[in-house]
Image: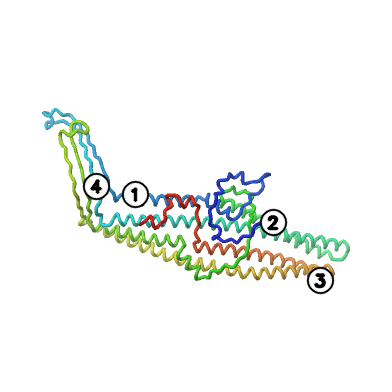
Amino acid sequence: MKKTILLTLTALSCVMTPVSAVPYGEMYGENNEPVQLTLAQSIEMALATDERIEAAQAGRDAAKWSLSATRRSTGPSVTWNSQAYRIGGENYRLSGYRSTFANSWNLTVPLYTGGQLENQQEAKGYALNRADMTLENTRQTVRFQAAEAYANLVHRVNLERIAQKAVDMGGAQLKLINDQYTEGAVAKADVLLMQVRLANYQQNLNSAQAALEVAESTLASKLGLPQNTDIEAVDVFSYEPYEKDLPACEAYALAHRPDGKAAELAVKSAEAEKDAAKSGYRPRVNGVAGKSITGTKVFQNERSDSWEAGITLSWNIFDNGVTAAKVQQAKADVNQYQAEANRIKKTIQLETRSAYIQMKTAEDNIKAAAAAVKQAEESYTIAQVRYEEGVDILLSVADAQEKLTQARSNYSTALYQYNLYRATLEKAMGIPVIRSDKERNHPESIQAKEEHT
């Protein structure tokens, strides 16, 4: 049974039990029946199987460990050096020793790095936030493309039915004309004309069936299924007015689009890297402690035993302009990322505006096309009756049938475009993908603002 749906991403963001957990073979009924899928199930499968999400998650993991490494570099480090030598010569001849062993342990704690570690940590935190936004943007893209492919399948099914109905109507009309021709009521030209029209209807049906097969293969590929999978779309289109106005949509998009937020985070990360580069102008202070022993056997100290603790200060007074060059490079990076962020902001506004205008145009077309279908149906009925009564010619009936078929196709297309552009608008606005409880509670799913502070 078909379910009427509105193709809106807001209602399709929920992630339920992963469909991919069900073996592919078990998705078929007996006798290899088609796979019946709702729009929500299709999106679940796409989110569970798309390799782009896996790649984005790996990128996020890499950013997380990069931040972890930077954080840990602010803590103490301990090194152990061990040496073992075979000795000889005049200096050692009277000692009777032929071997010497030395061991030293050194503890270093960075106390002041001129802001290098602090700013690098901040930059890595922003990079992790950016990876989170990239992952979310990837999920939104996968969700939209699955919805787009599903909508295209529904649309192609509708067009195939309209084309089939045109063939059926043409066949019935041809039978009636043949009967009338046999009785001598119509000319041979009428029969030939209807045969040509029916051949055209059949060609349209063949094209619609081929497009339907392509749509099935496309959706199957998006869902991680074999491309020859026979899919039956359970849901069909509906129409509900969209309440938000364009300024509200643009404001939401600028505040929530993950690629826009990622671009802003790239600027912040570059600014932090610039501040880190300036640390080359400043001194470095470390807390240090060490112990060393030397003996004729491993870990013995009969020859020497010493320890020291204190602080060290180093300052690169002159580096031939290396630090200045790095700072200028970092400034250029900031300018580059800022320009890219400005470009993405314009793109977000344009995509949102374009999708909104196209959605509203399709909304107007739905109303006009619905009225046209009613008028075409009435016109076809009248033409058919007039022809049967002998007061009109066959050409009028054929023209009325073509107009009815076109009106039905226009209505189906308008409904498809409205739903598709509404989904496109919500993709342009950055409507988030709501994750499962398991993902939200996973220890690595930390909020971005907590990761970089």
Q: Earlier in the sequence, mark 3 or mark 2?
A: 2
Q: Amino acid at mark 1?
A: Ala
Q: Amino acid at mark 4?
A: Thr
Q: Nearer the viewer, mark 2 or mark 4?
A: 4
Q: Give the structural element (helix, strand or loop) at label 4.
A: strand
Q: Give the structural element (helix, strand or loop) at label 2.
A: helix
Q: Residues within 10 Å of mark 4 (few under 14, many from 20)?
A: some
Residue 51 coordinates in the image, percent (x, y): 50, 50
Q: Which residue is mark 2?
A: 206
* Depicted 187 relative to depicted 320: above or below: below
Q: Is residue 126 visible?
A: yes
Within the image, what quadrant is residue 181 found in? bottom right
Q: Amino acid at mark 2?
A: Asn
Q: Earlier in the sequence, mark 1 or mark 3?
A: 1
Residue 367 coordinates in the image, percent (x, y): 65, 70
Q: Which residue is mark 1?
A: 69
Give whichever of 413, 32 is nearer the camera.
32
Residue 328 coordinates in the image, percent (x, y): 30, 61
- In this picture, residue 90 sits left or right of residue 21: left
Q: Are marks 3 and 2 in contact (CB under 8 Å)?
A: no
Q: Residues within 10 Å of mark 2 (few under 14, many from 20)?
A: some
